[in-house]
Image (tube, rainbow, N blue to C red):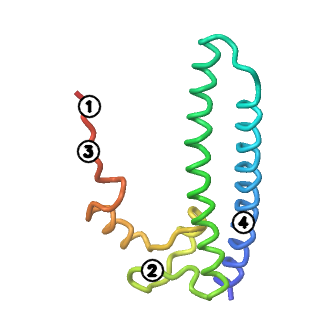
C-alpha cells in the first residue's frame, strides 16, 4: 500500500508541474508576441532582443519536452503502467521516481541506454 500512496503523491506532483509548465509556455508565447509588436530600437537593442528571443525559444523547447514527458507519465498512471521500466518491465524504485517523476526506465536500463550511444552521455566534445 505504501507504493500506491507514493504513486498517488507523485501524480499530484506531476499535475502541479504540468500546470506550471503550461502557464510558463503560455507566458513565453505572450511575451514573444508583445516583443515583436513593439517598434525596434537601435541595432544594440535588436541584438539583445534577438538573444533574448533565442534563449526564450530554447527554454520553451526544453519546457515543452518536459511537458510531453509529464503527459506521458500521467497517461501511464491511468493505464496502470507508471513506475514500470519500459525496457525490462521491472519496478522503477520510488527514490528514482521521486527524483525524476517522469522516469520511464530503471537506473540499470537507463545506464545501458546511455552506454549504447542513444543518450546525451556519449556525446564527445572538443575541449582543445
**According to the image, label 3 marks what residue?**
124
**40 vs 26: above or below:** above
Q: CA distance from mark 3 to mark 1?
A: 9 Å
Tag 2, which secondary structure? loop
Say if mark 3 contacts mark 2, CB within 8 Å.
Answer: no
Quick one: label 4 or label 2, which is nearer the N terminus?
4
Q: Looking at the picture, tell me which residue is in the foreground, 57 or 79.
A: 57
Q: Which residue does the numbered mark 1 point to in the structure image?
A: 127
Decide: few, some or many residues near mark 3? Use Cα within 10 Å; few <14, some 14-19, many ≥20.
few
Q: Nearer the viewer, residue 55 or 96?
A: 55
Of residues 31 and 42, the one nearer the viewer is: 42
Location of residue 90 in the rendering, given as x and y in whole percent from the top left corner: 44, 85
Estimate the x, y position of residue 111 in percent, counting from the top left.
34, 65
Q: Residue at x 62, y 29 (%)?
A: 52
Query: What is the x, y in percent for residue 121?
Result: 34, 53
The quarter of the displayed image where residue 58 is located = top right
Res 30 → quadrant: top right
Q: Are marks 1 and 2 in contact (CB under 8 Å)?
A: no
Q: Secondary structure beneath disc 1?
A: loop
Q: CA distance from mark 1 to mark 2?
A: 35 Å
Query: Label 2 belongs to which residue?
Result: 86
- Of labels 1 and 2, earlier in sequence is 2
**Label 3: element kind:** loop
Callout 1 environment at 10 Å: few (<14), some (14 to 19), or many (20+)?
Answer: few
Q: Quadrant of the N terminus?
A: bottom right
Q: CA distance from mark 4 to mark 3?
A: 35 Å
The residue indicated by pointer 4 is: 13
Amino acid at each position: 500500500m505504501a507504493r500506491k500512496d507514493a504513486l498517488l503523491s507523485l501524480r499530484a506532483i506531476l499535475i502541479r508541474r504540468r500546470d506550471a509548465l503550461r502557464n510558463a509556455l503560455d507566458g513565453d508565447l505572450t511575451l514573444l508576441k508583445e516583443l515583436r509588436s513593439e517598434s525596434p530600437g537601435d541595432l544594440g537593442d535588436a541584438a539583445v532582443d534577438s538573444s533574448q528571443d533565442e534563449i526564450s525559444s530554447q527554454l520553451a523547447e526544453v519546457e515543452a519536452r518536459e511537458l510531453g514527458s509529464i503527459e506521458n507519465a500521467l497517461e501511464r498512471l491511468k493505464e496502470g503502467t507508471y513506475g514500470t521500466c519500459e525496457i525490462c518491465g521491472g519496478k522503477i524504485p520510488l527514490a528514482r521516481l521521486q527524483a525524476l517523476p517522469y522516469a520511464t526506465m530503471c537506473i540499470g536500463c537507463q545506464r545501458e541506454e546511455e552506454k549504447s550511444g542513444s543518450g546525451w552521455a556519449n556525446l564527445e566534445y572538443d575541449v582543445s
